[in-house]
Structure formats: C-alpha cells, structure tokens
Image (cartoon, rainbow, N blue to C red):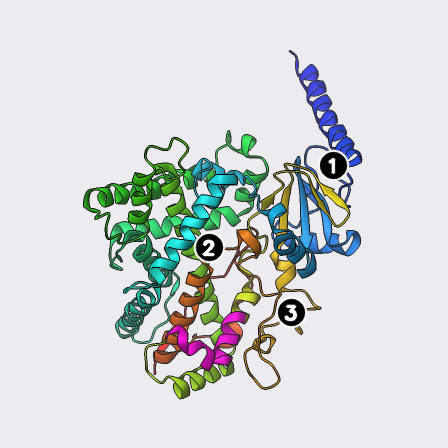
Amino acid sequence: MDFSTTVILAGLIVALLWLFSVKNRRKYHLPPGPYALPLVGNLPQLDKNAPFKSFLKFSETYGPVITVYLGWQRTVVLVGYDAVKEALVDHADDFTGRGPLPFLMKVTSGYGLAISNGERWLQLRRFTLTTLRDFGMGRKGMEQWIQEESQHLRDRVKNVESCMAAKPFDPSFLLSLSVSNVICCLVFGQRFKYEDEKFLSLLQIITNTLKFASSPWGQMYNVFPRIVEHLPGSHNTAFALIEEIKGFVSMQIQEHKETMDPSSPRDFIDSFLIRSNQEKDIPSTEFHHENLVSTVLNLFLAGTETTSSTIRYALSLFIKYPDIQEKMQHEIDTVIGQSCPSMENRKSLPFTDAVIHEVQRFLDIVPFSLPHYALHDISFRGYTIPKDTVIIPLLHSVLKEEKHWETPWTFNPKHFLDQNDNFKKNPSFMPFSAGKRACVGESLARMELFIFLVSLLQNFTFSCTGGPDTINLSPEFSSFGNLPRSSEIIATPR
C-alpha cells in the first residue's frame, strides 16, 4: 500500500468517526457544546495549562451542562454548584459510575476501590468505610495516630531549624512523610522512621506520580492512551516506578499473612485478609489479592500527596498573610494553650477552622474531581447523557462560584464565619466531591489537616527570607491536580 492510499484511508476513517459523532448528537438530545473537530474534538480549544478554565468559558455560552469531546471521548461537564449537586446528590444512583481513566486503569488493571464499578465498587467501598470507622474508634484510633505523628513532625522541624540555624528549608518531603505515616498506621499497622530509605523512595515515587498525572503528557496519555503507549516518554518511567510500590505492598501483605491473628486484626490489610479467608470458597468474591493491592495503592496515592500538599499550601498562606497566622495563634493559645490538639477542640476554634476550610477552597486541589461515567443512558435536565459518556463534575466551578462565595478569587476566611464570628458551613464546600463517590478518606483528611496545622502553629511562627510578597500562590501544575509550588520557609520556635 503506497503512502497516498494510506493517507486517503486515514482520512476516510477520521471522516467516519466524525460523522458517527454527529449522528450520535442527532440521535440523542445531548447537552449543547462547542463545535468539535474530527479526531481531536475540542482539545485545540482548551487551555493546556488550566483546561478547567476553558470549561468555565464554555459554560458562559452553553450553560451549566456542556458536551465536549476530549479527542474522540464524548464528555459531559457539569458546571456550578446547582448542576453538580443535582447530579451527584439528588440523582446519586445515576451518577455512581466511575470513568475508566486510562492512567488509573493501567496502574490498577481495573481492580481496587477508585476505578471500579458495580458490585466490586459497592463491596469494596462498604468494607473500606467500615474498616476506617472501626480503627477510628479503636483503642489506638486514627486521632491518636495523627497526634503521635504530629509530635514526630514537630520534633523533626525543631531539629531541622537547630541544625540549619534558622535557615530556610523546603518542608514538602517532611510533610509527605508525616501524612503518609498516618496511612501506614492504618494500612500496615506501623509507622516508618523518617530515615527509612525504602519509605523515602516510595514517597518520592508517589510525588512524581501525581506530578506526571497533572502534567500535559499525563493528560495526553488519558486522552490518547493507545497512541501514547507506543511512544517514548515519562509515562513509561511512571508506570515502572508504580510497580515498585505494588511490589512493596505485596511484600507487606505476605508478611501480614505470616503473622496475622484472625481474632485481632491490626490494620486494614489484616481486616481484608480475614474477609478474604471467610469468602475463599465464593468464586465471585471481590476480596482477593488484586483488589487488596490496588485498594491500598488507592489509599496511598489519594491520601498522601493531596493532604500533605494542602498543609504545605497552608504554610505558604500563613506566610503570605502573617496577620491571619497571628490571629490563629492567638486563638489557639487562648483556647487550648500547649495541650495536644484534638478534634474536640475544633468547635472552640472557629477562626482556625474557617482558615483551614478556606485553604482547601482556595487551593482547589482536584478541580475536575475524578471523572464519573454513564453506566446507562441518563436523563438529566431534559438532556440525554448516553451510556459510556465520561462525566466531569467541575469542582473548580463549585469552589469558585461567585454567587456562593463573596470573594471567590481571594483568600478570605470570612467565607466560613457568620456575623458573630462563629463558624458557618457552606454547601458549596466540596473539595472531597459529593454523593456516593465522595472521597472515602474525607474524615481522615479533616483530622490530619486540623491536628497537624494547629500543632505546628502552637510551636512555630512561619516566615520566609524575602518576606510575604515573595510567596507565589499560583500552582506549579494546574490540570488533573492543582499542585502548589515548593517554597523554602523558616519555622521560628515560639
């Protein structure tokens, strides 16, 4: 076959694909959206550095429910609190499907909690939520683990400062170590020393994985996986490194099998293995090795970098706005002094609680949420969302919507305070998403953010060498995740 014939055939295929999409648009009463080009869809119209901003612009023309094509993948984007809440909460059963995100599918082979659907998802979610609650209420519950880890973090920051004579340091890795150790206590029943080389290596892999997923190349993999698979690039390195984490998890599982007491589970892995043994004669059981490895991987990837990045961003905001930092410290000193912070203190620290909520809102760490998926044809607001359509609840549009936030584009703790300076909730606060697919680790993340940040402010005042004006709050990566920039800080003991 000569070159010209190949070009003609390729052109025919592209034309057929385009005609098929046009036919589908006519067959179904799809939500409106911008004109899509053959093969590449609406990709050329998206801001490659912050694609969620392009969806906001589309909504100004086409409304809060939009059809776009990411390559050849039909995608419906939900913009604003009303549309997102109506879908994920009011019509929760229709929107429980999880999109087969190619990156996560490659990493997990479709196993585990995050990417699964149907009976697998139902069983794994129910089990994970129950296990989290059980260990949270145990004699060494989650809150105690976080309190103990916060002490380790404080001691390490003091050591860093004393060794460096108040010179600036980057807290990124130290925060990742602390947050990840909480996950390790929950999953493995142990914490790792901050000097543990294997632990340090795994955390670096987690950091690099999230950076890859948020990079333009990572997004390209999600849009054109079959093409990118055959190309050289950072995706090959990312997948190879993730295999190292899976190998570490498998080793931990084997050690648990050898030392487990079925009458006294120590952690998530023990609980899963006990359930697996109970269902060993059930051919359709979802409690098997592949689901255990992938669910543990889900907990690590979701729970380590997102929470530690939020804490790191909070420290940058404290430096940027020293008056807010000082007001938080005064409230903490007045109410609990040097007592170990607990979740019980939160209702007595309304300003501190408001600031932590505003940190999450302003960072907007997962602007797209994880994509949902139409497992069947869905009727929504007079439109049809056909089966196999990816659905993006644009959390960015909820956290920055002008009609629900007084000053959405500025950092303003008053968003969570009433006229008497008492804490007030805002239904548009959805950093963990909403509905039946909301983050299973939400309660854990809330505990970590509150206890770690209060503990740090009890013991240190944060600053930087160049002063507040040198702090850059714009994200380093802004795509799948809004990842804050690394900044060198000074932690002055109080």
Q: Does residue 420 lie above or below 236 as drawn? A: below
Q: Tell me whether the residue at label 2 lies in contact with that at label 1, contact meaning CB atoms closer than 8 angstroms.
A: no
Q: Position of residue 361 (x, y in %)?
A: 56, 66
**Taking the image as drawn, is residue 356 in sight?**
yes
The numbered disc on residue 37 is 1
Identify residue type, mark 1: Leu
Foreground residue among 487 and 103? 103
**In magenta segment, residue 353:** yes
Residue range of the region highlighted in magenta in the rendering:
342-357
Residue type pointed to by label 2 = Val
* Vertical arrangement, residue 298 with respect to residue 1, above or below: below
Task: Please tell me which residue lies in front, 91 or 397.
Answer: 91
Residue, disc 3? 408
Label 2 environment density (alpha carbons within 10 Å; few <14, some 14–19, many ≥20) = many
Q: Earlier in the sequence, mark 2 or mark 1?
A: 1
Q: Are marks 2 and 3 in contact (CB under 8 Å)?
A: no
User: Residue at label 2?
Assistant: 440
| Residue type at the position of mark 3 | Pro
Q: Residue at x 46, y 50 (%)?
A: 210
Could you say whether the residue bearing mark 2 is in a helix, strand or loop?
A: loop
What is the CA distance from the residue labelled 2 to the residue labelled 3? 27 Å
Where's residue 350, x and y in %? 50, 80
Distance between mark 3 and mark 1 Cα atoms: 34 Å
Q: Earlier in the sequence, mark 2 or mark 3?
A: 3
Q: Position of residue 37 (x, y in %)?
A: 74, 36
Instruction: Provide the secondary structure element on which disc 3 rests.
Output: loop
